[in-house]
Amino acid sequence: MLFIKSNQCGSRLLQRHVSSFHLKPLRINTRIKVLQLKMHQLPPNTVRLLSSSQVITSVVNVVKELTENSLDAEATSVDVKLENYGLDRVEVRDNGSGVRAEDAPVMGVRHFTSKISSHQDLESLQTYGFRGEALGSICAVAEVTVTTKTKEDDISTQYALDLSGNIVSQKPSHLGQGTTVSVQRLFKNLPVRRQFYSTTKKCKEELKKIQDVLMAFAIVKPELRVTLYHNKVMLWQKSKMADHRSALVATLGPNVVSHLQPFHHRHEDPEIILDGFLPKPGADLSLSSSSSADKAFIYVNDRPVQHKEITKMVRQHLGALQAEEARARFPTFVLRVSVSAAAVDVNLTPDKTQVLLHHKEAVLTAVEDLLVSLYGPQTSAKVQHAEEQPGLKAPKASSDSTKEIREDPTEKSKDIGAETSTNSKPRALVSTKEMKKGINTEASSHCPTSNNSSSSSIADDWIVDQIPANFSLCDDDEATQNFLTAANLDGNSLERLGGGLGAFSTEEWSRGTALRDPDSDKPLQPVTILRPSSEPAKDEDKSSPSSSRPISNAIIEKRAALTAYDVLANRAVRAPLSPAALFEKETRAEVVSDNPKASLHQINAAVREKWKTLSQEERQKFEDRAQKHMEHHEQARAASAETPRRVSAQGQKRKALSNQQLLDELFSAQPQKKLKNSVSKPSRTVGCSLASLRQNLPRLASSPPSAPLSPCPISRLASQGSWLLLAGHKLLVLNPFRVEEALLFQRLMDNNILPTVALKDPLPLTEESLGGAENMDALCSMEKQSPELDGSVVFSDLRLVANGFKIKLSPDRQQVQVTAMAECVPFLGLGDLREILTAVVQKKTRAVSGCRPLKVSNHLKGEAVRLVRQMPSHFSREEVSEILRRMETQLEQSHRTCLHERPFTHLLCELPSTEQEARAVATPLHL
Ligand code: ADP
Ligand code: MG
């Protein structure tokens, strides 16, 4: 099959991705199957760009790859069965489209795929798989059978594949439509790898990882039914669900989900849509978190990925609201990032769990904005938290900075009220109390527990409660009540609920209108972002009287855009609002009070309609106010720009730098501003004019080529430690790190000896396993040590030893065994020993570097890169000269590319050698 993008133009594509988690059931099937094409081999240049060579390193890899294949085949049901933690058998059965008989002969052969045709197709990738390597890699380390039937086939066929993925036998089978891949005796030829699973602890960890992988798919694919069995015992299952929320409940359980809130956030240019579920501000993190990041479900275009920076951001924002002990935990959350397919590179790691976001900074900023809108600016939240906690002293300066950003004394009292209401714990508790009131036996009988729930039995973290059968179909409020019923809320926590607050509906609660200021009877705002100006915001108050203070819907509202100085100065300055945004803020409250039952969608539509029909004078009013906002904003910025040092002196600066990345990004995005405000740098005027340059250039050019032909360093460039070189008439930019890597790699190839680890069971070698009698003879004739006490002889030939093989000849000289092997090279095995011997026999190679197996040389490349990364970030002129000298003497001309096959140098320009050329060079200077 070939999956073809239906429409790559960003926003339409996103539209499909973003059937929001909470607003409506997801109609997700972003993969549009347009036509079925034969499976085909990828062209070599594409393979070179894609190849990962080692996809399968663990049982979890096998399960993930096979599940992805099932999902790519549009399966709606996937059963994963393991025996002996997957080492004896992994079976993944699906009800997908199946493999056509004519494709079967190549399905297990590396680089045959039906998903892409060339590297360019990655720009519009709609499938999980694309390298055509997984089945082939699994075949190389296990015994694989594939049973498959397409819609057109009458019966299914079972194919047995050999080590290279070719069919060795086939027979009819009784299975229905879909594909069942059975992987037996995994890592049978990789004793070191099997040894990795020698402890039960390791095996259990692997099982847990497998469940986590399946959970990730289960959450993002509500329509998917998944089961996981181990030794015929069902460990976990999730039924088909109607929407993401239900899928989440079925996967994580209602207790956890009751602590999460849905969100939807859109960022424009580049278009980024974020949606999912994050802990409610008042959620008890000890319930909605785990001790590792395994419940942080991050997806990029529905592909489960790991993203440390996003996880860290969420932790920081939530941690700021939590008690000390909860901060060490990892919050449970689901974050879907939807961007256009062309803006993601998934061809990064063999297991595809990391992606390269082309607009990473924009995505991180969007996430930061989202978090700020949900939890408030991080630093002030911390301050607030510290103030609330009697045991935790707020830093002195914090009260000052809090004071500094107050708007005026009247606002202050309101803020205090707001802060109390923002105090998340009581807020959540009040709501639960009120909601509990609504819970009756009827509600429970409405929602009997069912087998549709997820269940688990392996690790504590996995235990998920039974859930009500119709849970997924309830709307938010019912659902919340049902959560509470199912969760059997503990009585003590309810006792702690604050008294004195009138009853309110959960709807009011979710709209933020539940808590009201006792004086004005206006809804309290959950988060108030205060202006950093010390000057009272009279204008603003006049123009937006408190009676019409809007109900802030932090999720929908435009985000506060932080600037670098805001972060430095430890204060948030809200971006000025447009007239329409101001109108929306005000009108939303009216619309909600007029029609309390309106959905968010209806509210938005009503507000838009009102804006359209607004009279000219009214519109002008908002335009004036927007203008004032803008002025305030400018003032606030100016104020914060003037006093960053003061804040620093108060010891706050460090705290504010909670997100160095954001800061870096902000600085790089505001070069002029930085220049304007930075301390003036010492400068020197250099006598130079364009006219003299123009005169001198031709003279230089016409003078005999005195410039050296071998490259000589001129000056270091500011970025990336690059150097400007002059080689003859060529002006070049050199990346000295690339040269260092190549030099180091060459040294490692020549000399490095891989450390070995003794095998539990030595591996006997036969002519067959070594690839023929010739290879065995070559091995036996290699250099050996003198016999050991028991008469056995160890091979000392560097070509074996340096490549991580310790081989022994038995005392009776009848048996040759591998007794120890390198562990640092994943999957080192007999195939690699064969590779060494073949090089020795066929190329008569004596040098170690000439018979490094591919896996070993890849490992050494990685080592070279790693070691060079530890070097200082800049080289001096002398060092660069030395690097160049070593490059000349030690690297052959043909090897003068870096480990990633990129050139060491980049030609900037050729210096003119004739007057004419010089003029041509000089002409653009007229500009
Ligand atoms: P890739 O997924 O990168 O294409 P794989 O080695 O995982 O590479 O699979 C090779 C091909 O085998 C796939 O392109 C697909 O056409 C076919 N295939 C594998 N598993 C399945 C499955 N479960 N259902 C249908 N086709 C499958
Ligand atoms: Mg695949």
Image (cartoon, rainbow, N blue to C red):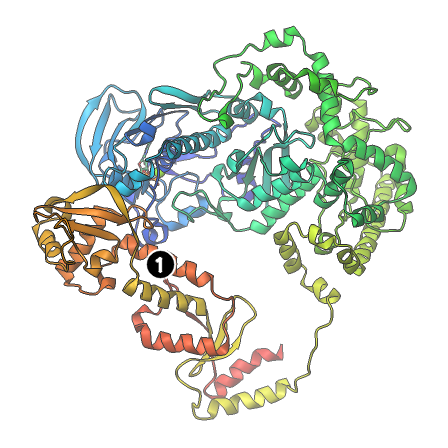
584 or 142, which is in the foreground? Answer: 142
Q: Quadrant of ligand 1?
A: top left
916 or 544, which is in the foreground? Answer: 544
In the depicted structure, whether residue 28 falls above or below residue 664:
above
Residue 893, by quadrant, is: bottom left
- What residue occupies the far front of the structure in this picture? 789
Q: Is residue 541 visible?
A: yes
- Image location of residue 37, percent across then percent down: 32, 38
Q: Is residue 773 left or right of residue 915?
A: left
- Image location of residue 63, percent across then percent down: 36, 33
Which residue position is annotated with label 1?
Answer: 861
Q: Is residue 804 left or right of residue 675?
A: left
Quarter of the image that includes the C terminus = bottom right
Q: Amino acid at mark 1?
A: Lys
Quarter of the image that includes the N terminus = top left
- Kindly tell me whether mark 1's CB lies below 8 Å from ligand 1: no
Residue 24, by quadrant, is: top right
Q: Residue at x 24, y 21 (%)?
A: 155
In the depicted structure, whether residue 678 falls above or below residue 302:
below
In the depicted structure, whether residue 558 falls above or below residue 884:
above
Q: Is residue 190 visible?
A: no
- Image location of residue 216, percent across then percent down: 48, 32
Q: Residue at x 72, y 20 (%)?
A: 506
Q: Residues within 10 Å of mark 1 (few under 14, many from 20)?
A: many
The local secondary structure at tag 1 comes to: helix
Q: How many badges with numbers are in the image? A: 1
